[in-house]
Image (cartoon, helix red, strand yellow):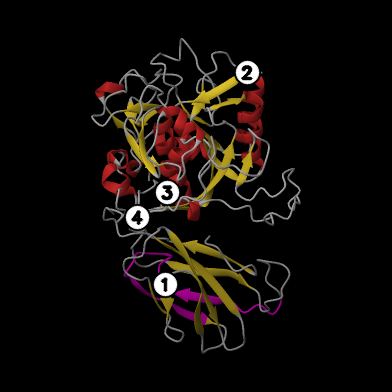
Amino acid sequence: MRFLKIDQFSAYLLCALCASLFCLTLTGCPAAGGGGGTITISSVSSSPQDPTPGIPSASTVPLLLTGGAPSAIPGQTLDFEASGGQAPYTFSMVSGVGSINASTGDYTVPAGTVGLPRTDSIKVEDASGNTVSLSIRIHANGAAIDPNDTLYASEWGLATIKARDAWSTSADCNDIVIGVIDTGVDYTHSDLKNNLWKNPLEISQNGSDDDSNGYSDDLYGWDFANDDNDPFDDHYHGTHVAGTIGAVSNNSSGISGACWRSKLMILKFLDSSGSGTISDAIRAIDYATANGAKVTNNSWGGLTSAVQALQDAITRAQNAGDLFVVAAGNSGVNIDSIPEYPAAYNNANIISVGASTSTDGLAYYSNYGTSNVDLVAPGSSIYSTFPTVSTTGMRNAGFSTKNYNWLSGTSMAAPHVTGAAALVWSDDPSLTSAQVKSALLDNVDTKAAFTNKVLTDGRLNIDNAY
């Protein structure tokens, strides 16, 4: 049995979505906040019971919506007009944060709307009951956004990677399930509990495997270390990682995550000592792949020789279109010549992350390598969530402070990249994993300290990735 360990630095104690009955074709879509644009309906079913989406029946009555744009910003009002069919027309909101006048079609996004981007759905019905709907993507107005979280000022890492500028475009990762493969997560934490993935097909605590995925009552994920359905963090590492990725944000309390709203899937395979087996890591990766995680954070490593079965699991995730973000390791060595795994695997879906300091230097403990480390991200003295109770791992490490704490390591760097990947992907769900990876790697801030140390010569910049 071979073991893996966490990559915390141990010496540091501290088009539009349409209604199901027709298709929309968007043409001339302007940038966020732009004007103009024509939204045409390629086919509209004359009956809401038409069983063939997008295929017009003989009695189809086409409608045309004009005068609006398929994207908007908070505070903006768009005027939608309908033609075709039989007047008068009735406008209504199907879902979203905006409001629309039922008779005039004036649609308004409330000023100060947060958790962007969001999507509003609007329906138009003519006098004969023919309906058409369209989706409007709501973006922010381009101004940098500082969340009102009381401890946000301590998060130098988010400021360095230009998160506040990126949030003006997108702060919401709810469209992307993020797997946290680690020591578990304190799912009772007030800054995390509302940003957790919940298995939509599982009925809690009924003792049954409702979704037939091989795991009973896996509401938040699974504990592979103890083989049960309670992935609570009995260490502290996974809770810290989770907060950097997706702590509940702009709620006047605690810290901010890179993603203000998120779906964190808890995949515990490391025990209270921070160690775990390769077989449990494989099971955790496969669970994430099978249950919809598009990106996983893997702040662990320690293998000095490649294990084919572990790489095969990462390959299965790659074939499913998923990203595998991994900490580069804390040995302070060039892992091109002295490889550590999984960071040194050559899978196309891997993003290997080294650690930077608050002065944009390479952390002295961080592994590096122009082939096996892609970029760096803030990893030294990172403030994030901590378990709300004193855990075995905390006591063993000498931590007495609960709820929030400081840690260092490439373990802390990787979740900045994971959050950034989820933000980019949520802003444009049509992207492939390769395109998301390229968006992050092609838009780093290059710095002298990272030149010839990592593939990109640079440090993560979320804002540049959009």
Residues at marks 3 and 4, CA–CA distance in whole angstroms: 10 Å
- Foreground tag (1 vs 3): 3
Relative to 464, does residue 380 appear above or below in the rendering? above
Residues at marks 2 and 4, CA–CA distance in whole angstroms: 41 Å
Label annotation for residue 247: 3
Residues at marks 1 and 3, CA–CA distance in whole angstroms: 25 Å
Residues at marks 1 and 2, CA–CA distance in whole angstroms: 54 Å
Disc 3 + disc 4, Cβ < 8 Å: no
Task: Please state, as top left, top right, bottom left or bottom right, where the N terminus lies in the image.
Answer: top right
Disc 1 + disc 2, Cβ < 8 Å: no
Give the residue number, with chain letter if any, for mark 1: 98
Where does the image place residue 242, in percent across and percent down from the top left?
46, 42
Residues at marks 2 and 3, CA–CA distance in whole angstroms: 33 Å
Q: Residues within 10 Å of mark 2 (few under 14, many from 20)?
A: few
**Residue 246 placement, left or right of 2:** left
Write the start and end of the magenta stretch as one range: 58-83
Disc 2 marks which amino acid?
Answer: Arg
Mark sitting earlier along the chain (1/4): 1
- Residue located farthest toward the left when viewing the structure as drawn: 359
Mark sitting earlier along the chain (1/2): 2
Q: How many marks?
A: 4
- Foreground tag (1 vs 4): 4
Q: Residues within 10 Å of mark 1 (few under 14, many from 20)?
A: many
Can residue 174 be seen in this snapshot?
no
Comparing 89 with 139, the one in front is 139
Give the residue number, with chain letter if any, for mark 4: 253
